Amino acid sequence: MTPETAPTTAYKRTMHVNVPIDLAFKVFTEKMGAWWPQSHHVGGTPFKDILIDPRTGGRWYEINAIGEQCIWGSVLAWEPPKKVVLSWHLQPDWSFHPDLAKASEVALEFIAEGPETTRLEFEHRHLERHGAGWEKMREQVSSPGGWPVILDLYLEATK
């Protein structure tokens, strides 16, 4: 394949929200459990909340109704209110793998475009790190039921 026809290993999206940068960052990093679709959970039961420990090295995880935790990844970069990068340890079969070398990254950059307007540059990158089946994961996360619907719900939560 030529570079022009090679499949991309990332899902990218640019969004604009009509809120200050601090609020855009907070809604994504502190209120995820309020807007994330209930159907998108990894544990055996629906989640009660989704949390990000607010520090580099922290966890990204869900807590179910009976208090069990299911880790999705970790915080690779924490620079409020401008940037957060999360490791995504969920594999093509949606199981968790602890090896960072087999994890993709969910990167968000928040850019103030005015006092009440923020641009969000979203990228789920390095999907090829998941190894066999990464193409299926790329297809799933970029399908209408993947990141597009999740990010649309985030946009609604900022209104």
Image: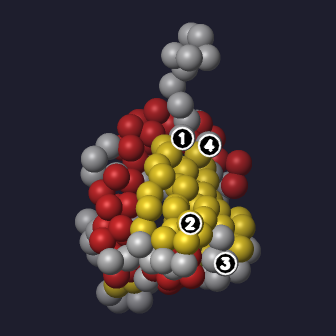
- Which of the pair 19/7 is nearer the observer? 19
Q: Residue at x 38, y 37 (%)?
A: 139
Per the image, the residue denoted by label 4 is 126
Q: Residue at x 40, y 47 (%)?
A: 141
Query: Which mark is on residue 10?
Result: 1
Pointer 1 local density, CA inside 10 Å: few below 14, some 14–19, many at least 20: some
What is the secondary structure assignment of the residue under circle 4?
loop
Q: Nearer the viewer, mark 1 or mark 4?
A: 1
Sequence order check, earlier mark of 3 and 4? 3
Q: Is residue 111 left or right of residue 119?
A: right
Check contact, mark 3 vs mark 4: CB within 8 A. Answer: no
Q: Nearer the viewer, mark 2 or mark 1?
A: 2
Residue 13 vs 156, above or below: the answer is: above
Amino acid type for the residue under numbered disc 1: Ala
Sequence order check, earlier mark of 3 and 2? 3
Q: Is residue 97 left or right of residue 117?
A: right
User: Which colour style is shown?
Assistant: secondary structure
Amino acid type for the residue under numbered disc 2: Glu
- Which of the pair 123/116 is nearer the observer? 116
Distance from the alpha carbon under mark 2 to that under mark 1: 25 Å
Distance from the alpha carbon under mark 1 to that under mark 4: 6 Å
Query: Which mark is on residue 113?
Result: 2
Residue 36 vs 96, above or below: the answer is: below
Distance from the alpha carbon under mark 4 to that under mark 2: 28 Å
